[in-house]
Amino acid sequence: MSASHAETMLALALRESERFRKIPEQEAAVPRAPGKWSRKEVLGHLIDSALNNHQRFVRAQLADALDFPGYSQNEWVSSQGYEQRNWADLVTLWEALNRHVAHVVARIPVDKLSVPCRIGSGAPVTLDALVADYLRHVNHHLEQI
């Protein structure tokens, strides 16, 4: 299952980064609606998600169970000032992170896919479910860009 997830992740990173590179800098900085994130901020959130999930995917392989803190997404995006970053740099970073996450996911041993993972106060889920949820989360936000 993780190899399939990894292939999907890699294809998504390659395809979407090409699409993102066609979005002008000025457009990327405009909030989608009053009180909503801009494309830069949505992509910044996806960068944060890649970094957090990379840690989860690696740490879960090294343990019999994983307890990992959640994160306050709005505060993470705000504190990092993604709206002030260069769009092309954000796209390059997001693509590179997801290419690496796909590589990590492809290497998860089958016997580790069932490791229980608890994120914040959420109910435990398997590492395999966490990987699938990461893909679902990425797809959800890609629709906003």
Image: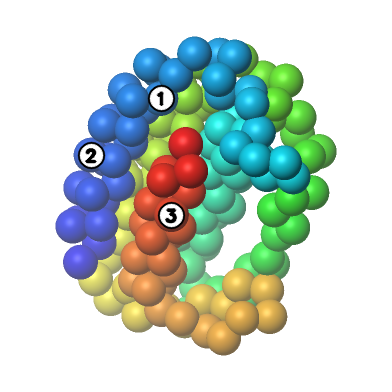
Calculate the distance from the C-alpha at mark 3 to the C-alpha at mark 2: 16 Å
> Quick check: can you spot residue 50?
no
Calculate the distance from the C-alpha at mark 1 to the C-alpha at mark 2: 14 Å
> What element does badge 2 sit on?
helix
- The residue labelled by disc 2 is 11
Instruction: Identify the mark at residue 140; answer none if there is no mark.
Output: 3
Residue type, label 3: His
Contact, mark 3 vs mark 2 (Cβ under 8 Å): no
The N terminus, quarter of image = bottom left
Residue 116, placed above or below residue 55: below
Horizontal and vertical percent position of residue 10? 27, 40
Taking the image as shown, residue 12 lies to the left or right of residue 58, namely left
Q: Which of marks 1 and 2 is in front?
A: 1
> What element does badge 1 sit on?
helix
Contact, mark 1 vs mark 2 (Cβ under 8 Å): no
Taking the image as shown, residue 65 lies to the left or right of residue 143, namely right
